[in-house]
Amino acid sequence: DQPTRERLSVPFIKHFAAMHAVDWRPTAKDAFQAPIADARQAARWQVNWWTKVWRDDRTEGHPLMGLAERWLRDHLPAATPDDLVFVHSDYRTGNYLFDESSLEITAILDWELVHIGDYHEDLAWAAIRSWSTVENGTLLASGLMTLDQLCERYSGATGRIVDMKTLYFYQVLGLYKCVVICLATSVNAARRAHNHQDILLSWLAAAGYAFLSDLHALL
């Protein structure tokens, strides 16, 4: 309900800001690569990574994925070193635990894709339709708040300005990633029987087509 959403939105934004406030500079050289060679390297690295995974793991092609890759490469946004944060890559409702009484978030899950990148990437991911809610025709990011509210509250907590064109780029990239995960890597792993979750991985193929539909609509 609305009161629960409002209360849970507070720690959701608080932890968003806390994650992005961690200084990556002291640890980057030891454990992470920082995309600081040029202004578009952060976006380019992500496009390069996920297009390579798509090409390596796909079992069949989809023309929309080629169109999406070309669009992404044609619209790489610029980012300054100050725009770079530790991007969680999967921060959303479904990947945190919370106490039902206090509605405080107690743990954040699934850190395997963390990297140094543009903070817009996490914002866009949190608002993907599949783990959001549509109420009276309005999408609630991660089932908690509108996209405008997410951006405004994030800006208020961090002092960062959300560029809507950059956010749109990462919305497209986020859906592209979802298709890769579901229709390429998951299906490939299930076919090769490399995982004890073969049934779940096969089921994800159906979700992949929903992501393709959302990607088509966004483009």
Image (cartoon, helix red, strand yellow):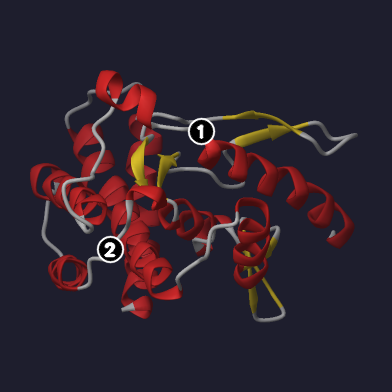
The three-letter code of the residue at mark 2 reads: Ala
Q: As displayed, is residue 38 above or below residue 66?
A: above
Looking at marks 2 and 1 on the same chain, the residue that comes earlier in the sequence is marked by: 1
Q: Position of residue 135 (x, y in %)?
A: 71, 73
Choose between 173 and 167: the one closer to the eye: 167
Task: Classify mark 2: helix, strand or loop.
Answer: loop
Q: Quadrant of the C terminus?
A: bottom left
In the displayed structure image, the side of residue 63 where residue 132 appears, left or right: right
Q: Which mark is residue 178?
A: none
Q: Residues within 10 Å of mark 2 (few under 14, many from 20)?
A: some
In the displayed structure image, the side of residue 134 where residue 87 appears, left or right: left
The three-letter code of the residue at mark 1 reads: Val
Residue at x 36%, y 71% (from the top left corner): 213
Q: As displayed, is residue 64 above or below residue 181?
A: below
* Residues at marks 2 and 1 touching, judged by CB atoms closer than 8 Å: no
Residue at x 23%, y 57% (from the top left corner): 39
Residue at x 45%, y 39% (from the top left corner): 88
Q: Quadrant of the N terminus?
A: bottom right
Q: Position of residue 79 (x, y in %)?
A: 32, 58
Residue position marked by numbered label 1 in the rendering = 22
Q: Residues within 10 Å of mark 1 (few under 14, many from 20)?
A: few
Q: Residue furthest top?
A: 30
Q: Position of residue 52 (x, y in %)?
A: 11, 46
Residue at x 34%, y 46% (from the top left corner): 117
Q: Which mark is residue 78?
A: 2
Q: Position of residue 160 (x, y in %)?
A: 54, 58
In the displayed structure image, the side of residue 41 where residue 128 appears, left or right: right
Choose between 127 and 18: the one closer to the eye: 18
Q: Alpha carbon of mark 2 to alpha carbon of mark 1: how far?
A: 21 Å
